[in-house]
Image (cartoon, rainbow, N blue to C red):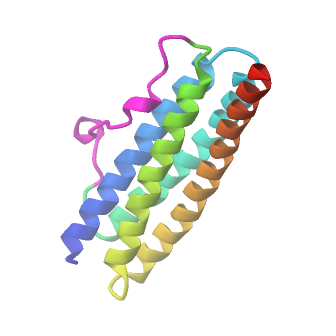
């Protein structure tokens, strides 16, 4: 892979992280209800971590003498992470969060493959961020399992 391709992949990751920050912040405030409280707390805690990811990606872009995208260049894609019409629909946000984390995981794996043997610093960063995203997805898969368990108990 060329340096330009790696830069473009980093710019995409940067945009993904910033979009995640915006959606986590919105949902950590907007969601309501007993089931939503732990999810809101987790989202609020993760805002700082995701912003840190974006910062680290921006630093790496700068090290590569690449331009860091501004807000007008960011293309949103996280449709399922938008605040729901009904603020008690935390289950939809959990599903959207899992989808967003899966997209980030897939993207970081692509960066890891693209940089293998070519750019170990970027590869190391992508591996670190991949581990964080896998941890987030696992946590939200636990929330989804909780919704399913609650639904099973309600049916019984």
Question: x%, y% of residue 137?
Answer: 59, 50
Residue segment shown in magenta: 68-86
Tell me, yes or no, if residue 66 can be seen here: no
Question: x%, y% of residue 76?
Answer: 31, 36
At 48% from the left and 31% from the top, the residue drawn is 23
Q: Which quarter shows the N terminus?
A: bottom left
Q: Which quarter shows the C terminus?
A: top right
Tell me, yes or no, if residue 18 can be seen here: yes
Vertical position of residue 51 compared to residue 79: above or below: below
Which SS type dominates the magenta stretch? loop
Vertical position of residue 17 compared to residue 33: above or below: below
Q: Is residue 63 left or right of residue 147?
A: left
- Residue 41, quarter of the rendered image: top right
At 23% from the left and 74% from the top, the residue drawn is 3
Vertical position of residue 137 compared to residue 127: above or below: above
- Residue 13, quarter of the rendered image: bottom left
């Amino acid at each position: 892979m060329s340096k330009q391709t790696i830069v473009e992949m980093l710019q995409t990751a940067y945009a993904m992280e910033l979009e995640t920050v915006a959606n986590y912040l919105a949902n950590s405030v907007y969601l309501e209800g007993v089931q939503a409280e732990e999810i809101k707390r987790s989202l609020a805690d993760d805002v700082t971590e995701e912003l840190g990811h974006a910062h680290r990606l921006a630093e790496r872009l700068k090290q590569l003498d690449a331009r860091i995208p501004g807000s007008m260049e960011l293309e949103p894609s996280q449709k399922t992470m938008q605040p729901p019409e009904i603020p008690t629909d935390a289950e939809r946000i959990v599903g959207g969060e899992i989808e967003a984390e899966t997209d980030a995981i897939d993207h970081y794996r692509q960066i890891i493959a693209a940089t293998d043997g070519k750019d170990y610093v970027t590869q190391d960063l992508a591996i670190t961020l991949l581990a964080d995203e896998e941890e987030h997805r696992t946590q939200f898969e636990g929330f989804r399992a909780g919704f399913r368990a609650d639904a099973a108990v309600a049916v019984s």
